[in-house]
């Protein structure tokens, strides 16, 4: 079934859906420009703006449900951004409204949680300003009705992410992590930009409507190239291989940031991009295949990294990579996978935010300790944190009837039908998930206390535990709600299409049973290693495999060897060349004109060589390039 | 009303007036007042400009040397108009920013501010001139106030930098003079009026030689790789305010000249040399950015970012599509605001600590959050973050170039990665990390400095979200220029309905 037409809309809450963006943006502006005067109420204003944005989203959703399914794609025109290239318009449809609800609801809870978490931080107001900025930018990303608007939001969330990872910027590690995240993302944006240029050159339109129309028309469309370029952008934002390295470092940011940006929302933007660009990807098997391969590779890589981390946040970050890998895999399959990709994205948003905030609650009580080898037995002192975390844990490993069980199983089943190799690898990933998540839970909440002497763990205040409770409720019920009866697939189909034949849910399919069995093996193995056995206070050396996983599969080492070091050499060479070669030529000219004997002597002793060299190199480059450019 | 002459006249009279004021403080206030009046007048003029009216508006024409056909002739199209607006917006900001800059040395404070107003008149004149000879005169005359601003009020190596700047520019100017005279002679029209000279040179070989004469002068001015090496020295030694006017406005004369004179007077030669210029531009974009990454001196770093940015502008001019050309013109304006903000805020920082070296800083954010925050915004505008106006122009240049020249545009796009590296690394080394002992007591921006930075950031933001007012003026002028070449935009591979665009 094809997606529905977009209908221009005005009036009602949908007509005013720009308020969703404007309110948090206003909050950010007031808090940043208002300075210390707004310190007193900054956090409250931040929360109010996020909640207000959620209210608008909810009302827009209700209005949208009032239309017949085929009329649920509403375009809202705002103004002309770049005449001749793109207008600013919003597209409120089942896909974007799903994101809006997720972003503003989970976002509001995380704002509330942060009141408690950041209570003692002198820069709390700035923190809320950045959080508001993030929410606004993320909503621009998902609400824009064209690729330029998407790009504006895309870079906007990148900025917010940069500011929040580096929030404790006096720590050199945080500052470096922030910079790394931005730069690696820019590598992805390089691809996304060129993808957008190609779209414009092909259709002279950047709107989703125009692209869909053009794709339907057909002709000489470089769909594979566009798809792969967009995918590069998606890999950057969603920390998929080969641009995954920034996400683990991003855990330097305050934990609510990790929950909101680096788990529930921003990092899923790549999945959104692939699903939103369905008309392009569905025209190219190659690009779709690459998407699924990237997804599977990352879901395994992230899971393997997750098994080896002692830092609770980094273990969760590996898990995030891995879960997004699942979504990417589903998104690469096409209309059969879209609903599962987005459904898993939503349930993951709840259970992963739940667990990240739970980790934050643990750290809050443990003097910001992140090393799980120094946790142990915390379930008794932090009962609410433990219970909510445990629900999130059951949901992610796919414990029957909880959220992840439905959404992840949907992805695995669809993948299995699409391509058995991909399917079995996804099953394997589920098994590893069972292991590393159990390891995390056992090391943190079970076993003996391994606390530092000065640790006095305690339960967090209500402002932090209530968000945990609400998120864990979502982690329980959302999966069944979305998947049973294909509720979400039917809701989403006007926006992204759906397969002619609706999938049916079998609780006892071969794939499902195999997955459960493998997960159980993972859990039992983890109990044997980390539950019943003593956890050593210092990490054992382990085999080369452990080292491989601990060092993030040598991702950083690879980046350093292939990009950073050559880059540094190139920079040094260029600076040297610029001072000696190009400038030398000019200085000698100046000396000739000036006739200064001192300078003339220098020409005779060495500048001539660099002079000749620069002329030669310059001429060679020019002639070569002339041929290249001239023949295009 | 002779708007353009009034603008120049007020600046020149102001420059004379400043020298008569006895008191330095009064002289500064007077300068600021004059520059604000010029700004107000320019805005009054701009609102009367009709984008789809005559090509040149507010025209004036008087004989200057009748025997040779030299005129005092001025007028503006959309391109010249936005560049004049850029100039008159920047001058009062720079005056306010330079309040104490001239006091350190032994030179006269009044002269410094007087030079600024002289320069303002010339900047207006050079963009407004519609007589090629008059343009040449302004082109060369501008060097004089700038030479003194660098050479008398600059840093330790000011005279080396000023002489280098002068020699380079004079060399380019000389080539242009030869080409201007040759153009006059070969055209045989007995006039230097630009509109009368368009289309007079038919022979392609002649066009090529004349093109080179103009182009090299403009490439040095802009500066384009490999003619750029004077810029880092000049910008690093110039006082921050002079650096802003130099890089923000004076250098734009180079790229403006390419768009106005090279394309329209020598269209066939321009097309012939397009591969060369595009190559130089792309090299400049990547090379400038890489060398910027390796700089240890903040002002030199900013200067090299401009080498990269000028590559984008020249690329947009010579891609000869509407989007790229309009983008390049808008880029000239935005780059003035962006680089202006960077130079001025870096200047405030340098003034406080007394060092241009990045390594002498660290953790400034902790002690001077407003300074750090504004520096970050300025930096983000340099890396073309969406939401800031520089993004719009860079996007337009790249998308417009990509339509015609896929590979060069793709290589140029690596600039977005490199820009993130040079800006964020500089920011990290100066503003983040533990606060260095030497900067522990740096004061944050004072009220005057905030007034300097606020309008620049406001402009970057407003035109970032709503560039239409500028583009509405620029678009018809660029289309007009391209149609006289003529150059047409490539058609899309698949045509979609108009409303879907």
Image (cartoon, coloured by chain):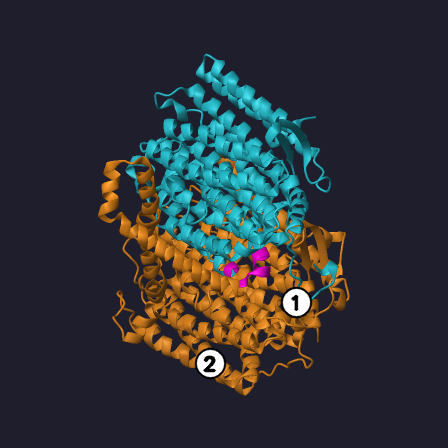
Chain colours: A orange, B cyan
Please name the residue that numbered disc 1 is placed on: B493
- Given residues B334 and A14, the one toward you in this image is B334
What is the x, y in percent for residue B17?
A: 52, 16
What is the x, y in percent for residue A286?
A: 55, 77
Q: Which mark, residue A236?
A: none
- The structure residue drawn at horizontal position 55% and vertical position 27%, both measured from the top left corner, is B121
> Is residue A259 visible in this depiction of the protein?
no
- The structure residue drawn at horizontal position 46% and vertical position 70%, both measured from the top left corner, is A322
Report the side of A78 relative to A134 (left or right).
right
Within 10 Å of disc 2 (Cα), the crowding (few <14, some 14-19, many 20+) is some
- Looking at the image, residue A542 lies above or below residue B120: below
Within 10 Å of disc 1 (Cα), the crowding (few <14, some 14-19, many 20+) is some
- The structure residue drawn at horizontal position 57% and vertical position 68%, both measured from the top left corner, is A226
Tag 1, which chain? B
What is the x, y in percent for residue A438?
A: 41, 72
Outermost residue to the bottom: A510
Please name the residue that numbered disc 2 is placed on: A425
B408 drawn magenta: yes
Q: Which residues are magenta?
A: B399-409
- Looking at the image, residue B324 lies above or below residue A422: above
Badges 1 and 2, same chain: no
Report the side of B103 relative to B134 (left or right).
left
């Amino acid at each position: 079934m094809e997606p529905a037409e977009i209908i221009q809309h005005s009036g009602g809450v949908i007509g005013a859906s720009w308020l969703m963006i404007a309110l948090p943006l206003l909050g950010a502006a007031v808090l940043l420009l208002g300075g210390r005067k707004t310190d007193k109420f900054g956090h409250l204003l931040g929360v109010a703006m996020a909640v207000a944005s959620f209210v608008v989203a909810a009302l827009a959703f209700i209005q949208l449900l009032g239309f017949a399914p085929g009329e649920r794609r509403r375009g809202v025109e705002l103004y002309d951004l770049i005449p001749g290239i793109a207008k600013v318009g919003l597209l409120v449809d089942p896909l974007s409204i799903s994101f809006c609800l997720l972003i503003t609801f989970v976002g509001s809870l995380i704002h509330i949680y942060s009141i408690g978490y950041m209570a003692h931080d002198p820069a709390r107001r700035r923190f809320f300003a950045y959080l508001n900025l993030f929410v606004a930018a993320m909503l621009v990303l998902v609400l824009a009705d064209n690729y330029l608007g998407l790009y504006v939001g895309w870079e906007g969330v990148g900025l917010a992410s940069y500011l929040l990872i580096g929030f404790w910027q006096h720590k050199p590690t945080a500052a470096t992590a922030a910079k790394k995240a931005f730069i690696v993302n820019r590598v992805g944006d390089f691809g996304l930009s060129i993808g957008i240029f190609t779209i414009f050159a092909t259709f002279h339109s950047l709107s989703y409507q125009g692209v869909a129309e053009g794709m339907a028309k057909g002709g000489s469309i470089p769909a594979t190239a566009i798809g792969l370029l967009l995918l590069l952008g998606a890999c950057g934002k969603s920390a998929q291989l080969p641009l995954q390295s920034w996400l683990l470092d991003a855990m330097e940011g305050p934990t609510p940031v990790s929950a909101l940006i680096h788990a529930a929302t921003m990092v899923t933007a790549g999945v959104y991009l692939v699903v939103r660009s369905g008309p392009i990807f569905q025209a190219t098997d190659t690009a779709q295949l690459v998407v699924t391969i990237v997804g599977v590779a990352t879901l395994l890589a992230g899971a393997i990294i997750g098994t080896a981390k002692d830092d609770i946040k980094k273990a969760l970050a590996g898990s995030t990579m891995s879960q997004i890998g699942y979504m990417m895999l589903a998104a690469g399959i096409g209309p059969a996978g879209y609903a599962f990709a987005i459904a898993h994205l939503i349930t993951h948003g709840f259970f992963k935010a739940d667990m990240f905030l739970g980790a934050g609650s643990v750290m809050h009580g443990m003097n910001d300790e992140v090393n799980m080898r120094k946790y142990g037995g915390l379930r008794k002192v932090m009962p609410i944190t433990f219970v909510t975390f445990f629900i999130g844990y059951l949901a992610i490993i796919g414990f029957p009837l909880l959220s992840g069980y439905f959404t992840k199983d949907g992805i695995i089943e669809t993948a299995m039908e699409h391509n058995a190799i991909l399917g079995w690898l996804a099953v394997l990933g589920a098994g590893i998930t069972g292991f590393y998540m159990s390891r995390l839970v056992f090391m943190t909440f079970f076993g003996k206390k391994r606390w530092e002497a000065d640790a006095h763990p305690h339960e967090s205040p209500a402002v932090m535990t209530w968000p945990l409770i609400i998120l864990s409720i979502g982690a329980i019920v959302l999966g069944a709600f979305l998947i049973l009866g294909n509720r979400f697939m039917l809701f989403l189909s006007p926006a992204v299409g759906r397969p002619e034949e609706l999938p049916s849910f079998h609780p006892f399919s071969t794939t499902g049973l195999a997955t459960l069995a493998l997960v159980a093996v993972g859990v039992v193995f983890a109990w044997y290693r980390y539950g019943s056995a003593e956890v050593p206070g210092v990490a054992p050396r382990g085999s080369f495999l452990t080292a491989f996983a601990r060092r993030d599969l040598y991702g950083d080492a690879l980046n350093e060897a292939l990009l950073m070091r050559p880059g540094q050499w190139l920079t040094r060479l260029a600076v040297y060349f610029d001072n000696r070669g190009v400038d030398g030529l000019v200085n000698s000219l100046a000396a000739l004109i000036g006739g200064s004997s001192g300078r003339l002597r220098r020409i005779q002793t060495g500048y001539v060589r660099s002079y000749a060299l620069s002329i030669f190199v310059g001429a060679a480059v020019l002639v070569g390039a002339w041929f290249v450019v001239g023949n295009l | 009303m002779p708007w353009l002459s009034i603008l120049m006249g007020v600046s020149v009279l102001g420059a004379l007036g400043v020298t008569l004021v006895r008191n330095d403080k009064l002289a500064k206030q007077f300068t600021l007042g004059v520059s604000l009046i010029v700004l107000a007048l320019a805005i009054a003029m701009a609102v009367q400009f009709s984008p789809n009216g005559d090509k040149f508006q507010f025209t004036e024409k008087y004989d200057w040397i009748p025997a040779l056909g030299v005129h005092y002739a001025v007028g503006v199209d959309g391109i010249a108009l936005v560049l004049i607006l850029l100039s008159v917006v920047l001058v009062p900001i720079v005056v306010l920013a330079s309040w104490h800059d001239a006091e350190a040395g032994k030179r006269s404070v009044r002269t410094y501010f007087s030079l600024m107003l002289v320069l303002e008149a010339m900047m207006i004149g050079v963009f407004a001139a519609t007589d090629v000879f008059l343009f040449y005169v302004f082109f060369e005359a501008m060097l004089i106030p700038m030479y003194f601003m660098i050479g008398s009020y600059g840093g330790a190596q000011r005279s080396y930098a000023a002489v280098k700047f002068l020699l380079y520019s004079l060399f380019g100017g000389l080539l242009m003079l030869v080409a201007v005279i040759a153009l006059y002679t070969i055209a045989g029209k007995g006039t230097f009026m630009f509109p009368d000279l368009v289309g007079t040179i038919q022979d392609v070989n002649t066009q090529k030689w004349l093109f080179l004469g103009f182009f090299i002068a403009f490439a040095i001015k802009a500066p384009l790789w490999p003619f750029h090496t004077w810029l880092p020295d000049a910008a690093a030694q110039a006082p921050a305010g002079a650096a802003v006017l130099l890089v923000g406005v004076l250098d734009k004369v180079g790229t403006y000249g390419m768009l106005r004179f090279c394309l329209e007077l020598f269209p066939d030669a321009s097309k012939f040399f397009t591969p060369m210029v595009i190559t130089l531009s792309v090299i400049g974009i990547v090379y400038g950015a890489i060398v910027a990454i390796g700089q240890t001196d903040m002002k030199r770093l900013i200067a090299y970012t401009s080498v990269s940015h000028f590559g984008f502008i020249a690329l947009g001019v010579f891609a000869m599509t509407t989007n790229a050309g309009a983008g390049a013109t808008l880029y000239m304006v935005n780059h003035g605001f962006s680089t202006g903000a960077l130079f001025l805020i870096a200047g405030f920082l340098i003034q406080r600590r007394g060092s241009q070296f990045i390594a002498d800083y660290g953790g400034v954010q902790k002690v001077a959050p407003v300074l750090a925050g504004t520096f970050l915004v300025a930096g983000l505008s340099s890396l073309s973050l969406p939401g800031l106006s520089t993004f719009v122009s860079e996007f337009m240049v790249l998308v417009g170039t990509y339509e015609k020249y896929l590979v060069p545009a793709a290589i140029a796009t690596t600039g977005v990665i490199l820009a993130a590296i040079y800006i964020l690394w500089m920011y990290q080394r100066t503003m983040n990390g533990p606060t260095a002992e030497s900067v522990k007591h740096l004061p944050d921006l004072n009220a005057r400095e905030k007034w300097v930075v606020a309008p620049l950031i406001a402009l970057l933001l407003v035109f970032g979200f709503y560039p239409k007012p500028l583009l509405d003026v620029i678009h018809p002028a660029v289309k007009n220029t391209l149609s006289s070449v003529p150059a047409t935009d490539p058609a899309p591979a698949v045509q979609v309905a108009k409303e879907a665009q």
